Image (tube, rainbow, N blue to C red):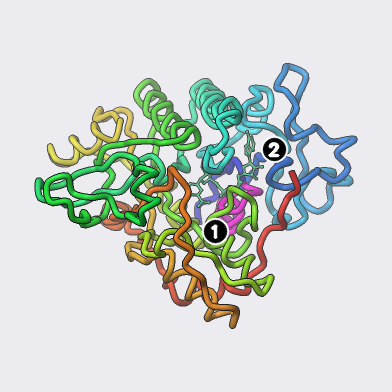
Amino acid sequence: MTGEHLLITGGAGFIGSAIVDAALAHGYEVRVLDSLRADVHGPVPGSEAAPRAEAAPGPDHGPTIEHGPAARAPAARPASLDPRVEFVHGDVTDPAVIASALAGIDVVCHQAAKVGLGVDFADAPDYVHSNEVGTAVLLAAMAVRGIRRLVLASSMVVYGEGSYRGANGFTRPGPRLASDLDAGLFDPLDPVTGQALEPVLVGESDPLDPRNVYASSKLGQEYLATAWARSTGGRVAALRYHNVYGPGMPQNTPYAGVASLFRSAIERDEAPRVYEDGRQRRDFVHVRDVAAANIAALDFTATQFTPRSAAVSADIASAGSTNSDDGIFRAYNVGSGIVHTIGDMAAALAAAAGGPAPIVTGQYRLGDVRHITASSERIRQELGWSAEVSFEAGMREFATAPLRAAVRP
Ligand SMILES: NC(=O)c1ccc[n+]([C@@H]2O[C@H](COP(=O)([O-])OP(=O)(O)OC[C@H]3O[C@@H](n4cnc5c(N)ncnc54)[C@H](O)[C@@H]3O)[C@@H](O)[C@H]2O)c1
């Protein structure tokens, strides 16, 4: 049991809530900082009195702190939050909020972010402000306070398309062409043979290729954390989550994961509509496993980590990291390690819920990647973490588990 003081940013969100539960079970003293973004949580109850989630940062915009069940009318405290958790309602981009949220904290688990696909470029300032400026404000305050330990929520989106083997060895194809997709040519083709390339697992030292604003903001967070580690001697574990699913997932928003969209269709007694040919490969990892990976990563930040070989040093460098001994950034893929297709997932959910069978539509979304699956060997070997929830058991549970209510725009 640790007794350490842990700040979880974004701890009211889908993944953050699961990390809160896991951290309490491991004996952390937990404080959550969350702005309760209106586009995630809906309007904050009593928001006349409470600071607005999207209020502009400024010197007079301080946090609202609510302690446990005995606190006064908790205008903004999420009802589902465990009473042992101290809740700070405020935005990570606000230096005043961060300064008070970090008081007495030993280690930070940074989950807060504007999530989604970055489909509308008009959202670019919001992604950059919330994700990159927010991370910069957090890291600057950690540097001032001498807090040296960070777990950062990153994403598989930093890789872009997955890795493939072709006639000339390993390759990373560029974005697919609309003309190919219109013709039903979904798999990237080998320029030498003209045949479909063979997808393989992506590793942490593979090239990074963020392809939308959200992805670039997640990689921006990694680079900021790297610079912070180098300049302060801090330790960062950046967890590149693959497709996370499980209870509490948001439902039916344009940004919701595909598992949630299928699940919502089945609930409406509609067939899940599977794009392309349904053979897109993904790694679906359960939210409780992701929470456990965060706990393992928190332990990592407390250890002395020294690159043991030239190979490991090279990995660190190519992951945009320092190989200095006084500051370490280490990226870890967080996936189940088992490949499934989108079609498999739709079928498993429909069968578990007794709903209509999926329909494969052949439609596509330009910009979607064809295959992206992770090697989670590094986190298994170095942090001793591996996923425990099987695809079958996880999908059975998810088929009927409560989802987070849809928020109207
Ligand atoms: N869900 C996935 O499949 C997935 C995959 C890869 C990476 N991630 C990353 O995991 C993290 C958590 O994602 P999630 O799916 O739980 O999203 P979520 O939207 O459910 O949770 C994010 C939480 O952060 C809060 N938040 C957002 N911006 C904030 C800010 N500026 N200040 C304070 N709080 C803020 C929101 O109110 C929300 O409660 C994110 O960093 C995301 O990029 C998620």
Q: Nearer the viewer, residue 336 or 149?
A: 336
Q: Which of 361 and 278 is in front in this view?
A: 361
Q: Position of residue 260 (x, y in %)?
A: 58, 61
| Disc 2 C-beta below 8 A from ligand 1 | yes
Residue extending furthest top? 59
Q: Which mark is residue 35?
A: 2
Q: Which amino acid does label 1 sit on?
A: Ala
Secondary structure category for the residue under label 1: helix
Q: Is residue 24 magenta?
A: yes
Please indicate, yes or no, whether residue 404 appears anywhere in the rendered image.
Answer: yes
Q: Image height check: is 194 above or below 245?
A: above
The residue identified by callout 1 is 22
Q: Position of residue 126 (x, y in %)?
A: 61, 29
Q: Nearer the viewer, residue 398 or 296?
A: 398
Q: What stretch is highlighted in magenta?
A: 11-29
Q: Which amino acid does label 2 sit on?
A: Ser
